[in-house]
Amino acid sequence: MTYEQILTELKNKKYRPVYFLMGEEPYFIDIISDYIIDNVLTADEKEFNQAVLYGKDVDAGTIVDNAKRFPMMSDYQVVVVKEAQEIRNLVPGSSDKDDDEDTPAIKNTDTRKSPLELYIEKPVPTTILVICYKYKKLDKRRAIYKLLDKNGAIFESAKLYDNQVPAWITGFLKKQGYTLTPIAAQLLNDYLGVDLSRIVNELGKLVINIPSGTQITEVHIEQNIGISKDYNTFELQKALGKRDILKANRIAIHFGLNPKENPILKTIPILFGYFSKLIQYHYLKDKSRDSLIRSLSISPSFVGEYMDAAQNYTPAKLRKVVGLLREYDGKSKGIDNDSTNQGELLRELVFKILH
């Protein structure tokens, strides 16, 4: 099931006896489990009919014992198991490593079913059991997966790719009644990464302070989140693309004076992605607008910028730039560098890219 399907069912008070929430992105798992905790039972019903367990404190038997109880003065009882990935052998036949469908299934020589498997075969209809299995996923070939698919709901929370985050941010704010400029979306992505929980926390500052219906710009972000609209990685890559020596060096100097807000270890991967796309541009047979948007995974607003930047860098120069980025990534981590600080390294890197 999808995240949206599960929430729609929950809001319509259609409950499954077991929810197995798994995957690399904890944000969606937390949203679903928190919704169940907050909304299925009334405040009075929660006192006797809701239990929140933690993986480090329980085993599969304890979970099943809680799930087999019957509600008191309520139609349902809710049992939520957080951090279930911490429970050793919760999933029959699994190892301490993530289950992976691309690897051979681990042969389970113990033919006895686990307490959890036996419970899922015949779950108590008045119990809503929620298992939060973060950063891992079940192998679909396992018997327990098939049981969950038949008698409950399985949700896999996949990590978003970096190029998917701006669209996700735009969609999230749209639901709150806001629009967002492409530059603002990219700025948030560059500085907040792919941690959706952190992103939502920062977006909350915008929602609280800006009237609904506003188009959020980089100015709003600077005022409410503290990310400079003039001195940021997005502006640095744009200046490098234009070969604007003065602006690029101003930003590099600013970064050097504020290394905590602008660490070189965060700047280099963003620049690497940018220049890698410029290399890809040169070797595309179809350089139409639609092709560039699709092939480079960029916003339509940035097509012109990439086309102009590609004219300023030959493929040979771009290969040298990528080599420089790798070299200075190593230096920033102490490889062949004992004393040069981050600010000096970035200024050196910017100089070599531009000359």
Image (tube, helix red, strand yellow):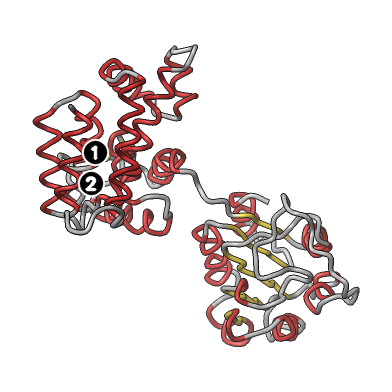
Q: Nearer the viewer, residue 134 or 329?
A: 329
- Return the residue at label 2: 221
Secondary structure under tag 2 reads helix
Mark identifier at residue 275: none
Q: Which residue is mark 1?
A: 217
Establish if 235 lies above or below 193. Answer: above
SS class, disc 1? loop
Task: Answer few, some or many: residues within 10 Å of disc 2's Cα (few below 14, many 20 plus, some between 14 and 19).
Answer: many
Decide if residue 24 is on the left or right side of residue 310: right
Give the residue furthest to the right.
Answer: 111
Measuring from the top left, give residue 202's x and y in whole percent.
Answer: 31, 56
Residue 37 figure quarter: bottom right
Q: In the figure, 12 relative to 95: above or below?
A: above
Expressed as whole percent of the image width and height from the top left, the position of residue 285 reads 49, 12
Q: Nearer the viewer, residue 193 or 40?
A: 193
Lateral position of residue 265 relative to residue 255, left or right: right
Figure quadrant of residue 355:
top left
- In the image, residue 108 sits, relative to residue 154, either above or below, namely below
Whether the residues at callouts 1 and 2 have beta carbons within 8 Å, the answer is: yes
Which residue is depicted at the point 53% across and 51% down?
159
Q: Which three-letter amino acid code belongs to the residue tagged 2?
A: Ile
Q: Is residue 52 visible?
A: no
Let me know if residue 51 appears in the view.
Answer: yes
Mark 1 to mark 2 CA distance (whole Å):
7 Å
- Residue at the location (10% across, 53% down)? 257
Residue 230 percent location from the top left of the image:
15, 39
Q: Amino acid at mark 1?
A: Thr
Pick the front one: 188 or 95: 95
Question: Residue 111 in the image: x percent, y percent?
Answer: 91, 73
